[in-house]
Amino acid sequence: MTDNEVPSARGLFMAAQRHAQSMPRPIDIGTQNVRVTNFMSVGLTRARDGFLHTLLEPTFKAQTFEQVILESREAAGKLQALGMAKRVNVALDKGPDDGVRVLFQCEDGSRYALKTGVNVGDDEGTANVTGRINNVCGGGEVLEASYSRGSKTQAAFQGSLSLPVNADPRRHIEVSASQTMADARPYSAHDEVRRAVGVAYRATGSMLTHDVRCTAAWRDICNLGPEASPTLRTEAGHSVKTSLAYTVSHDSRDSPTVPSRGSLVRATAEVAGLLGGLKFAKVHGELQTNQRVGTDFVLATGVQGGLLVGPGRSPLSDRFFVGGQTSVRGFEFRGIGPRDHNDSIGGDVFYAAGVSLLTPLPYVQTPALRGHLWANAGQLALLDDRGLLRKTQRGVREEVRRFFMCPSVAVGVGLVYHHSMVRVELSCGLPLVAALNDRPKPGLQFGMGVQFL
């Protein structure tokens, strides 16, 4: 065709069609079939072949581009969650046999860690040092050992080995051993040494967390003071416990220490005596809800309860204790329930309930410091002839009715400070109802911890 010739309409259409056919067409990654034929990692220096095979098995089974992309990102996220890599960049390239090669470009994770810290809670502060070895055998294993001392914990050691199940950071098997020597004074005139070994399985899902734990423990109530009560002297000595415990929980709170929304539901059941030693069954549950009222107020409610049953009298080391700033405020630590002279001896059944209102403070700009209005109530009793089952003129039914209808009650005001890792409370409490054995604590009360009623 010369410059003077005008192309026909048909000729232009045919040329345009040929040009369109030569252009690359968009690919629907959701339907485009593909298979992964090769994997390569750069920078990942400590990973077993068997671990990588398990980790990447879903990626190699993917059948579309979309599945390959999603499964590759999931595998990269697991490497980071297990601490085997700090960062992982995923790339796809053409592989052998008309397949796809998956490439992980990694920054290797830290191998060793050593840290010191302070833990607070249960009316005690402890200082600790923890050593940690990550990725011990190339499969995301973690070996950890810690030592701590505190105001009541004279010495505590714990060692554990955590193993991910099927290369999944949300499922672990943990083997642990621990020894703790604690001073129960001034609430009870004795020391207690606990030695335990255990195996646990923990799985975290989108809604629930499950924990199954098998423990063998050797406890020794020792070093009784000269003022120790007859009950405490009877309880003194060695005891062995083998138990199986299951805990299920759901936590949707936006903060574990000072939440402004969400709820926590947790229940634990324990059976002891499967392999000998002490025999009993124990259940414990708690419910906490948090919701905003307006824009600056938070209303929190909490309920806890527990029951311990078994043949004969229950062991002191496994009983419940109630009272204190992290439990029922307005009472001393372990200040509610049965006592023998000056010794708190715990109980087999308890309940506690609380309601709190967090408020803004005038002239205070930081939201970390809030006002606090609260009301707490609780009760604790033994299930034997020293408690609800004792023979009185009122009878057992009346004792049970009084247990539920006549709790110890306290109200108060205070301040709450929200630290990134701990909750700090300063309260002025007024006990309204207290039993003869209770130890009310009117006035100022200071508490630090993570879990509060």
Image (spheres, grey):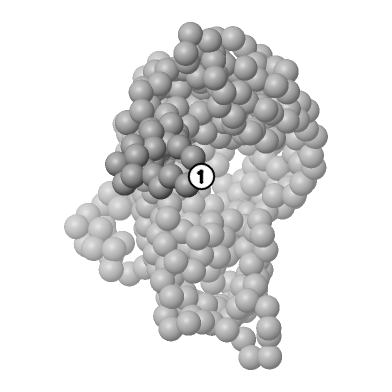
Helix or strand or loop: what does disc 1 sit on?
loop
Mark yes or no: residue 435 visible: no
Q: Residue at x 62, y 86 (%)?
A: 361
Of 171 and 105, nearer the camera is: 105
**Label 1 environment density (alpha carbons within 10 Å; few <14, some 14–19, many ≥20):** few
Q: Is residue 292 left or right of residue 117?
A: left
What amino acid is labelled 1 in the image? Answer: Asp
Q: Position of residue 231 (x, y in %)?
A: 51, 43
Q: Is residue 261 above or below residue 366?
A: above
Q: Is residue 6 above or below residue 449?
A: above
Q: Quadrant of the N terminus?
A: top left
Q: Position of residue 121 (x, y in %)?
A: 63, 54
Q: Residue at x 40, y 21 (%)?
A: 34
Of 54 and 380, nearer the camera is: 54
Q: Position of residue 395 (x, y in %)?
A: 21, 57
Q: Which residue is mark 1?
A: 3
Q: Is residue 234 above or below residue 369?
A: above
Of 382 and 295, nearer the camera is: 295
Which residue extends farthest bottom?
362
Q: Residue at x 56, y 38 (%)?
A: 233
Q: Residue at x 70, y 21 (%)?
A: 42
